[in-house]
Image (spheres, rainbow, N blue to C red):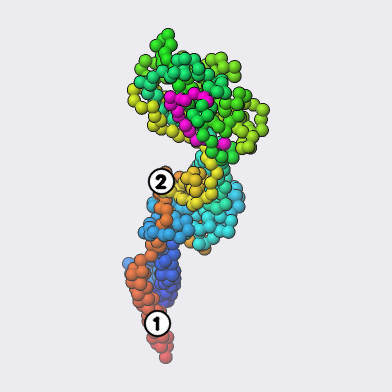
Amino acid sequence: MTINRAMQSGVTALAANASALSTISNNIANANTTGYKRVTTNFTNLVSGTSGTATYASNGVTAAVQQNMTARGELNAASSGYSLGIDGQGFFVTSDTSDAINQGSTMLFTRDGSFNTDTSGYLRNAAGLYLQGWQADSSGTVNPSSTDITRLGPINVANIANRAESTTRVSFDANLDSSTDISDAAANGTYDATSATAAMSVYDAAAGIGTKPDSTVSMTVSDSLGQQHTVTMSLLKRGTDAANNTLWDYEVWSPDVTDTAGLAQLATGTLAFNPDGTLDLAASTTNDATGAPGAFTSDYTIGASNSTAAPRWNNSFGAAGQSLSMGLSGASPTSEITHLAGDSTTTRLTANGTEFGLLTKVEIDKDGIVTAIYNNGNTRTLAQVALATFINANGLTPISGNAFTVSSQSGGFTLREPGEGGAGNLAPAALEASTVDLAQEFTGLITTQRAYSAASKIITTSDEMLQELLALKR
């Protein structure tokens, strides 16, 4: 009966508009929720197969709810905690626990980057979800994987001890002034690298011992405990050889080193320079323990303080042994020393290794790299934030906490580095605003209210018509 169908249409209209009112109220309630995506209600008419040209069978309307996950909210500056926004597509990968990730873990996805630390230093947002990322290894290298979730782990930014690292590589650029006169000590033969009174490593003008070097290259290195030591290469111009190479005697030494002769030396030898001012490795030498010249090398071994090997760190330091490469023998990193006109000077000097420091702060950059910064200026990479992308992000299933889980409609997720593979960059110290427009919601609220009232009129009018029909029997 068409009157009954009309009444039923009114009932479906009431239900559909009640659903619309529910989504509007939820949008208004979440107008200030970080990363919230506006939910919309779309109406779809229901048509009966019995409708024809002569009669029309009304079946009413149904409501379909959709949350637009690809809409991007405005990024607003935020100064609290470790706030993060996503400038583009993608979701933060989170878990409801700070335990290690495994194949059975429940992965949750959110755009809410209101991260702060819990009592153990792990990053979690306002909903209590823990931020996941790829952990850096001991050398600070991050190895991302797009599919292996077991490489992920909760990111911790507190109680991070700065590991002291010994120096293994020194790289420098230096020049020895080619106009330097041949040293008197070298010319008259009084210089002796093995003598406790004539070596450059023991030079003391006040005490009147040792040979004054013509030039020096000094560098600071760290031992295994993060203690700092000065290592010096002292150089003395000696003259030329039969191939017209210019020769300079050198000693590499440190006052913090013990050797067999008590001269604090790591190595001694001769540097030979070609007529064009470049170092001739084949003609350069490094003396062995007896002082006899051998193949040139600038790779040295320093023994532990408690070892019997020499050279070694002094007993008072308690340091472990280490290798030290100065790069002059061609090994990476490459150092360069030249023999050209101009001042004897060192223009570049770098060294790895760190002294021990206290954690000052932790920063996260746009690429998701989490870096610890210490009060001695050293830095350490801790992790990289991972983002997840989906084939159909609008198909994700919402759960409490402004988060989502994978569904059959969304498809599987792919882990991405920020800024790679379609994922957006991170916006440090920013939060994504809700996509709710209050003006639009209040307008929708008015129209929904009117539509609901109109639907109720359908029911009352149909009821009156049925009463008229029943009255015909009287």
Q: Nearer the viewer, residue 10 or 21?
A: 21
Quarter placement of the C terminus: bottom left
Helix, strand or loop under label 1: helix
Q: Residues under labels 1 and 2: Cα distance?
A: 58 Å
* Nearer to us: label 1 or label 2: 2
Would you name the residue on which mark 1 appears?
460
Q: Nearer the viewer, residue 203 or 157?
A: 203
Q: Is residue 217 magenta?
A: yes
Q: For the magenta stretch, what is the residue range?
A: 209-223
Chain-order first, disc 1 or disc 2: 2
| Tag 1–tag 2 contact (CB < 8 Å) | no
* Position of residue 253 measured from the top left corner of the image (x, y, whole percent): 53, 28
* Position of residue 148 measured from the top left corner of the image (x, y, whole percent): 54, 43
Would you name the residue on which mark 2 appears?
419
Q: Residue at x 61, y 37 (%)?
A: 317
274 displayed left or right of 194: left
Q: Is residue 252 magenta?
A: no
